[in-house]
Amino acid sequence: MTIKKIITEPNQLLRQVSSPVDKVGKEERQIMDDMLETMYAANGIGLAAIQIGVPKRMIVVDISKEENKREPRYFVNPVIKNKDTLKATYEEGCLSVPNQFAEIDRPKKCDVEYIDYDGGKKILKAEGLLATCIQHEIDHLEGVLFIDYLSKLKKSMIIKKLSKNKSTRIVV
Ligand code: NI
């Protein structure tokens, strides 16, 4: 397993729509292993393949808090079904939007259809933090970031801040 570099906003790659995976093979599992390792190293609870530069519909999630009780979940071609009309609000952050946080409302419960690590078709009933996390990650597959739900002003302030942090300022 390899820790990969996480792409951060602003970067056009993060706006790309990821392509469906035809088959979960060795290569796909390798990518998911790397994604998980990268996510753990960055102390995240979810990561989409595009965040390490791979435009494929794959996400990994682990909302367990303790390091010795890890519960990795892998979702290939995930699709949300039956969204709850009730909303849940969490203060969200994103490994691709470093050090920025905002309260986002999302459906409290949802069903997710996906293919698992071994290539099997699955359905998961998710709620609370898990539901929010999966929805956040699936947004990445559509090129959507949590900051897109904020007002134009808030969003542009965040992007400005991130752009500043990226440039190397020198005084000579
Ligand atoms: Ni994210």
Image (cartoon, helix red, strand yellow):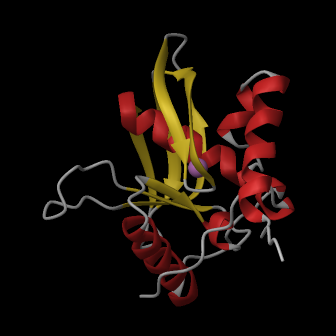
From the viewer's side, name the closer residue of 138 and 96.
Answer: 96
Vertical order, 53 against 130 (above or below)? below
What's the residue at 46%, 73% (across, down)? 38
| Farthest-out residue, left | 68
Quadrant of the drawing holding the C terminus: bottom right
Quadrant of the drawing holding the N terminus: bottom left
Instruction: Report the side of 7 relative to 71 (left or right).
Output: right
Q: Position of residue 92 (x, y in %)?
A: 51, 35
Q: Position of residue 84 (x, y in %)?
A: 51, 17
Q: Position of residue 118 (x, y in %)?
A: 41, 73
Vertical order, 108 against 168 (above or below)? above
From the viewer's side, name the closer residue of 49 and 65.
Answer: 65
Q: How many numbered discs, if any?
A: 0
Quarter where residue 151 is shown:
top right
- In this orientation, does residue 55 appear? yes
- In this orientation, does residue 9 appear? no
What's the residue at 81%, 61% (across, down)? 11
Instruction: Report the side of 114 relative to 96 (left or right).
Output: left
Vertical order, 81 against 86 (above or below)? below
Quarter where residue 128 is shown:
top left
What's the residue at 47%, 41% (across, down)? 133
From the viewer's side, name the closer residue of 135 and 117.
Answer: 135
Instruction: Report the side of 6 relative to 60 (left or right).
Output: right
What's the residue at 63%, 72% (across, down)? 52
| Farthest-out residue, front | 172
Q: Position of residue 127 (x, y in %)?
A: 38, 29
